[in-house]
Image (cartoon, helix red, strand yellow):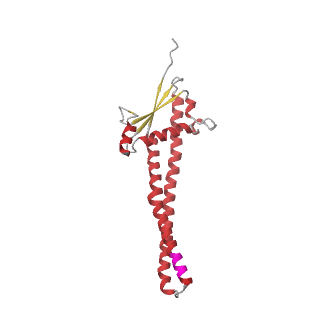
Amino acid sequence: MKGDSMKENENLYRINGKTGHFMIDIALDEYMDFFHKWDNAIMKKRDMNPELAEFLDLCSEDIPLKKGIDIHIRMEKENQDQEKEALIRDSYVTYYKTYFRLEKKKIRKLFKASSLLTITSTCLLLINYTLRSMLPDGIASDVILEGLMIGGWVFLWEAIHNITFERRESLYRYKELARFLKASILFDYYSISLE
């Protein structure tokens, strides 16, 4: 069922005849519409318009991850300006590189945390196993041993959860951001005739 809806979504996008990539079409009135309105940084470092970034993310979800994408920007009220096109391309790359690096760090942190949790779990379970033969029978001993056993399994479950579920989401986002970085940005212009 999900595969059918994915195919339907794929049909919403044109295919670039040269690259075979899916094309995400964007219409902008002016070059400045690409950028975040409140960002006063120099042009190359300016943030992308958050609504535009959200739109690109939604479109990306429709297109299978193994397929390439191109961004097609149609300028409605501007004449071609190659410097401004270059600024948009630089800003786009800066924006996605930033999130790409952050996601890479997040994946590394997940692996480190999972390793630490696994080591802690192993230590608690080994201490439990060692103390079983050393501690005398009694309520206090049972509570300590049960606490070590439960703690060991809880830490192990958390490590497994991080590796299987959390990492999968982060890896998907990492690959999606890599695809955005590989995308070509194409421009075309719509001139309004006043006749």
| Viewer-proximal residue among 159 and 7 | 7
The single residue placed furthest to the bottom in the displayed view is 136
Q: Is residue 139 magenta?
A: no
Q: Is residue 151 above or below residue 67?
A: below
- Identified at 50% across, 38% down, the residue is 55
Q: Is residue 191 above or below residue 157?
A: above
Dividing the image into 4 quarters, which one contains the N terminus?
top left
Q: Is residue 144 magenta?
A: yes
The single residue placed furthest to the top in the displayed view is 195
Magenta stretch, main secondary structure class: helix
Q: Specify whether 35 is left or right of 5.
A: right
- Identified at 48% across, 83% down, the residue is 132
Q: Position of residue 174 (x, y in %)?
A: 46, 49
- Identified at 49% across, 64% down, the residue is 158
| Viewer-proximal residue among 140 and 27 | 140
Write down the region rendered in magenta. 142-148
Q: How many numbered circles are shown?
A: 0
Q: Is residue 68 above or below residue 110?
A: above
